[in-house]
Amino acid sequence: ALNPMYGILLWGNTNSSFQAVQIQGNSIRFTDDKASTNSVKAIGALHTTGALISHNIIHSGFDYQWVNATNINLFQNFDFTGEQEKFRQEFQQLEQHRNR
């Protein structure tokens, strides 16, 4: 299996975690727009508490990864065509995961 690549990665562990992080105003994409989006994550947050992820433009083929991440807030993130729907869906999935 391929290890994922990340545009932005917050990599904490049980002894050291990220807290109160802001990720704002970034463009996350392949520079040539020709590379495969398989196993690519726009943002990964592992052992993270409290993150504001907003006003980013992200390649529509990229996913997110959340592991032991709580209080993650996403808003006003778009793909390069101006669509926001994918990111609303990602947020809803995050909320469903949080409420389990």
Image (cartoon, helix red, strand yellow):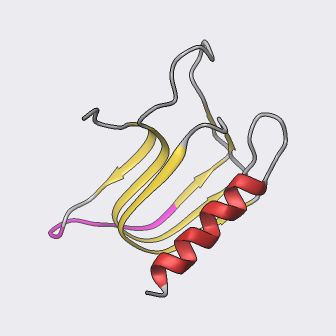
At 20% across and 63% down in the image, what residue appears?
13
1 horizontally vs 66: left or right: left
At 67% across and 63% down in the image, what residue appears?
89
Q: Is residue 58 above or below residue 93?
A: above
Q: Is residue 76 above or below residue 14?
A: above
86 horizontally vs 8: left or right: right
Measured as percent of width and height from the top left, residue 47 is found at 30, 66
Residue lying farthest to the left in this orientation:
15
**Residue 17 highlighted magenta (yes or no):** yes
Measured as percent of width and height from the top left, residue 65 is found at 43, 55
At 83% across and 35% down in the image, what residue appears?
81
Out of 88 and 46, give the one closest to the viewer. 88
Quarter where residue 32 is shown:
top right
**Residue 19 highlighted magenta (yes or no):** yes
Quarter where residue 52 is shown:
bottom right
47 horizontally vs 58: left or right: left
Which quadrant is the C terminus positioned in? bottom left
Out of 19 and 31, give the one closest to the viewer. 31
Q: Is residue 100 above or below residue 12?
A: below
Which quadrant is the N terminus positioned in? top left
At 77% across and 56% down in the image, what residue appears?
85
> Magenta residues, as a range?
14-21
Out of 42 and 51, give the one closest to the viewer. 42
Measured as percent of width and height from the top left, residue 15 is found at 15, 69
Residue lying farthest to the front in this orientation:
1
Residue lying farthest to the right in this orientation:
82
28 horizontally vs 1: left or right: right
Measured as percent of width and height from the top left, residue 96 is found at 54, 79
